[in-house]
Each structure stands twice: as C-alpha cells, then as structure tokens.
C-alpha cells in the first residue's frame, strides 16, 4: 500500500477542528482514504450500509474495472485464462500468485487428485437430510461438517493446516456436490476417478452409474471447466466478505467456507443463476418471446418487485466479461448437443436484446451478468436447476480460500467488527409485568 502525496481534509460546518486523513494508492483502481483513526480523532463513525464506498481490505488477487467490464485474476485477463488455461492452473494462480510451469502444474494436480475422496462416514451424515432438501442446504451442512472429519487441518493460524485445508476443500467440493445430487435422486454415490480431469471427474460422479461405463464428452468437460474458471473469484463480493469476516474470528477454515456457501445461496448473489433460469421458464410458459414486452413492463414497475435476473451488478456498469464468455460456451454446448434451436436460449438472446435497447436498463447501466447464460449451459449439460448454485460454490471455493489466506497473512488484519448508527430507544426502566 503506497501513501499518496495528497491528503484528504475533513471539515465540519459547526467549526469543529479539521481532520487530515491519509490517502493510499493501489496499483489499479480508485485510491482509498484511511479513516481508521477517525473515531479516535472525532468521536464519529462513517456510515456506509452495503459498503457502497468502503474498501474492507487490501488485496492482490482479483481486480474488476466495472466501467470497462474488465476482470483480472492476479493481473491476467479472464478472457486469456478462459481460453489458455484450465481450472486447476487457475486455482494455482489464485492461491500462489503465479501461473504454474509444467512440473508445478503436475505436482498440484496430483495433490488435488489425491484428496478427492471424502471420509466414508460423510455418507451417513448426508443420510440425515430429507431427500428433497435444497442442495445448498446440504452443502452448507457438509462443508461445515468437514471440520469434524479432518481434525488435522482446523487451525487457521497454522500455515500447514491452511494449505492442507485448501487442497482438501478444492478436491472434495466436486465429490460433495455430486453426492448431494445422487442422494436427492436416490442413486448410488460414484467414487472419484483420478485418471480423469477435475471437470471430467465431476461429470463422471454426477452422471455415471456403477452398472455402466461413463464416457466424458470433451466439449462438456471443457464447458464445465470454463464455468469453474469464470466463477473462481470476484474480489470482495458478499460471500467472500462473509468468509473473511467469519475467518477473522479465528474460526477453522471449513467453517469459514461454509459461511461463504450460505451467503452465496441468496438470489441476489449466487442464487441468481437458478432464479434466471426459472424466470426464463416462466416467460416461456406464459407464451415465450411474445410475452417479453409484458415481462419487461413488470420489471420496470417499482411496485411489482420483479427483477430481470442475471442482469445488473454492483460493480459492472458495462457488459460483464464473464457473460460474453458464457454466451460463447452456450453456443458451443448447444451445437455439440444438437440443440442450436433451443427455445430457452433464443428467448434469453431476445430478452437481452430488448433489455439492452430499453431506456430503463440503458440509463441504469444494467447489462447481463455471468448468471444470465450460465443456467442455460448447465441445464444443457444435464445439471438440475437447483444444483446451479452448488456448482458456483464448488468453483468459488478456491477464491474464498485464497482470500482467507491472504487475510490471515496480512499484518493489518483484525477481527471484523463494524459499528452502527443507533436509532432505537434511549435507556429506560423495565416495568413489572402487571404494569406493562
Ligand atoms: N432488474 C431490474 N432493475 C434492476 C436490476 C434488475 N436485475 N438490477 C438493478 N436494477 C435497478 C434497481 O431497481 C435500481 O433502480 P432505481 O435507481 O430506479 O432504484 C438501479 O437499477 C440500481 O440498482 P441497485 O439495486 O441499487 O444496485 P445494487 O448494486 O444494489 O444491486 C444486484 C446489484 C446484482 C443485487 C442487482 O442488480 C440485482 O438484484 N440483479 C438481479 C440479480 C442478479 O442477477 N444477481 C447476480 C449478480 S452477478 C453474480 C454474483 O455476483 O453472484
């Protein structure tokens, strides 16, 4: 963090003393005003619900330029990573800061592969859930439960524990997501197959059955790998900030990641891919392309509470670069499966076109985000709608861990403890029950 020559001065209209605040420069993006001493100097807090103007940490991992529609992992544009690297190389990059060379890649892939099985006891834990439980409810429980199964990697302050927890989480998430799926459909769990790629193994565990050989389609394998790369990290979003805040208390890494899974579930965050596909289904049911105008009208009506899911983003005020790559993958997958004329894809493209020409969306800079097309790809692969957010959680796990590890290694890190503007009752006395 580099101090700027410029300083900010805070003045008060009631003649209170001015306060000088340091400014720091990053390598990219807006400078930040350091307000850490503000309370000590003025007795006042800042007020910023939703963190609209607050940098909660310094980070070297991911950078988003929302106006340009740019996303960089450790400086590399997402478009280059998505076309030249696979997911495990991306994991290595996020965790270590550099892309691996051939031998580093082999060593890392072997390490992850060696940890893909989960403790056999996990099956019995899973059996406690209802068969119709939402996969994200199951995932929140399973990830949290890992801390009970892997006692040798629960000390967040021990770098070796953190490293092995990271590898275990990256390796076991596909196994757990596939187990959650198999459980809900009543099929036997498939053990991981270590000769397959990370994405190929996931497809095998999801769609294979013990009585038949499962052949991984290279196009679907590549598509899934791309979905994983595009979702791997996204700087200080709600779930990542949750993981950091949860981890800041010193809790174990599995518990911190479980908190991230829980946060991701919400429809304003990771749950948007499920909500976007359900929205397309609803429009299709009501008449398809013909009904887009009516639907857009509802979206624009503030009293309707209807949103165009898969559109809009707190940071991107331009096309989300991940949405472009996802649309490309969507074309590839649908062509491979002979579904070029998929009515849902046609509906999505038409909906996007109409929204992008509409003044409501133009003036608010609302563009498609990653979730607009990812549901169509996942549905074509055969992934059920309620598992979409589980796939997102699987992919985001590496980002959560990289950010958690970065926080623990930061000498400036403290337990996260926001303050508040209290607007409730002033102190008062409790009356005896008979007088209330
Ligand atoms: N449909 C209709 N109007 C919208 C939408 C939308 N999808 N998104 C934002 N707006 C409107 C909003 O009503 C507000 O209008 P006004 O200024 O008239 O009050 C304006 O645009 C600004 O929106 P905001 O709610 O202040 O923006 P935010 O930064 O708080 O919210 C968001 C960002 C992603 C929660 C929101 O755009 C949204 O709910 N989108 C739909 C859900 C979605 O697709 N989420 C996935 C995000 S990307 C993946 C991820 O990070 O998990």
Image: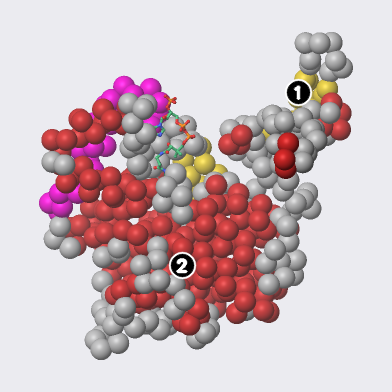
Q: Horizontal and vertical percent for residue 171?
A: 50, 73
Q: Is residue 1 left or right of residue 367?
A: right
Judged by its main secondary structure, the magenta piece is: helix
Q: Which mark is residue 117?
A: none
What residue is drawn where x is 52% and y is 41%?
64
Is the CB–ligand 1 distance for label 1 below 8 Å? no
Residue occupied by mark 1:
8
Q: Is residue 122 magenta?
A: no
Relative to 228, does residue 113 appear above or below in the rendering? below
x, y percentage for residue 205? 36, 77
Mark 1 or mark 2, which is nearer to you?
2
The residue at the far front in this view is 434
Identify the secondary structure beneath mark 1: strand
* Magenta stretch, residue numbers: 340-366
Residue 363 quadrant: top left
In this rendering, the answer to whether 15 lies above or below 66 is above
Q: Secondary structure at mark 2?
A: helix
Q: Give the left or right position of residue 13, taking residue 205 as reference.
A: right
Q: Residue at x 35, y 67 (%)?
A: 132
Ligand 1 found in image quarter: top left
Q: Which residue is mark 2?
A: 138
Q: Nearer the viewer, residue 66 or 414?
A: 414
Mark 1 nearby-residue class (10 Å; few <14, some 14–19, many ≥20):
few
State which quadrant residue 108 falls in: bottom right
Q: Earlier in the sequence, mark 1 or mark 2?
A: 1
Callouts 1 and 2 close, C-beta under 8 Å = no
In percent of the image, x 23 and y 56: which residue is there?
332
């Amino acid at each position: 963090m580099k101090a700027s020559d410029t300083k900010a001065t805070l003045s008060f209209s009631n003649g209170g003393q001015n306060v000088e605040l340091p400014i720091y420069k990053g390598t990219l993006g807006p400078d930040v005003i350091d307000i850490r001493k503000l309370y000590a100097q003025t007795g006042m807090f800042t007020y910023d619900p939703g963190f609209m103007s607050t940098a909660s940490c310094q980070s070297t991992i991911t950078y988003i330029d929302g106006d340009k529609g740019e996303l960089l992992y450790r400086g590399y544009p997402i478009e280059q990573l998505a076309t030249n690297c696979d997911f495990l190389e991306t994991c290595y990059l996020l965790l270590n800061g550099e892309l691996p060379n051939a031998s580093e890649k082999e060593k890392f892939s072997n390490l992850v592969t060696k940890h893909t099985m989960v403790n056999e006891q996990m099956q019995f834990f899973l059996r406690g859930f209802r068969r119709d439980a939402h996969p994200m409810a199951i995932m929140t429980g399973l990830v949290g439960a890992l801390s009970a199964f892997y006692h040798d990697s629960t000390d967040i302050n021990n770098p070796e524990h953190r490293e092995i927890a990271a590898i275990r989480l990256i390796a076991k998430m596909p196994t757990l997501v596939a187990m959650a799926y198999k459980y809900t459909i009543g099929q036997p769990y498939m053990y991981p197959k270590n000769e397959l790629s990370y994405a190929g193994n996931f497809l095998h565990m999801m769609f294979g059955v013990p009585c038949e050989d499962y052949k991984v389609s290279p196009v679907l394998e590549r598509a899934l790998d791309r979905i994983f790369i595009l979702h791997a990290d996204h700087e200080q979003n709600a779930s990542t900030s949750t993981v950091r805040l949860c981890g800041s208390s010193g809790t174990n890494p599995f518990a911190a990641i479980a908190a991230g899974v829980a946060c991701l579930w919400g429809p304003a965050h990771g749950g948007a891919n499920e909500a976007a596909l359900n929205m397309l289904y609803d429009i299709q049911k009501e008449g398809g392309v013909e009904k887009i105008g009516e639907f857009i009208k509802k979206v624009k009506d503030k009293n309707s509470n209807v949103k165009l899911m898969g559109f809009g983003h707190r940071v991107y005020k331009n096309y989300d670069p991940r949405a472009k790559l996802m649309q490309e993958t969507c074309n590839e997958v649908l062509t491979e499966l002979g579904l070029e004329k998929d009515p849902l894809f046609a509906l999505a493209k038409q909906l996007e076109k109409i929204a992008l020409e509409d003044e409501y969306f133009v003036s608010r800079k609302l563009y498609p985000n990653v979730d607009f097309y990812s549901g169509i790809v996942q549905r074509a692969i055969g992934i059920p709608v309620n598992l979409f957010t589980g796939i997102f959680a699987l992919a985001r796990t590496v980002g959560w861990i990289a950010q958690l590890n970065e926080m623990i290694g930061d000498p400036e890190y403290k337990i996260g403890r926001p303050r508040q503007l209290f607007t409730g009752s002033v102190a008062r006395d409790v009356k005896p029950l008979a007088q209330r």
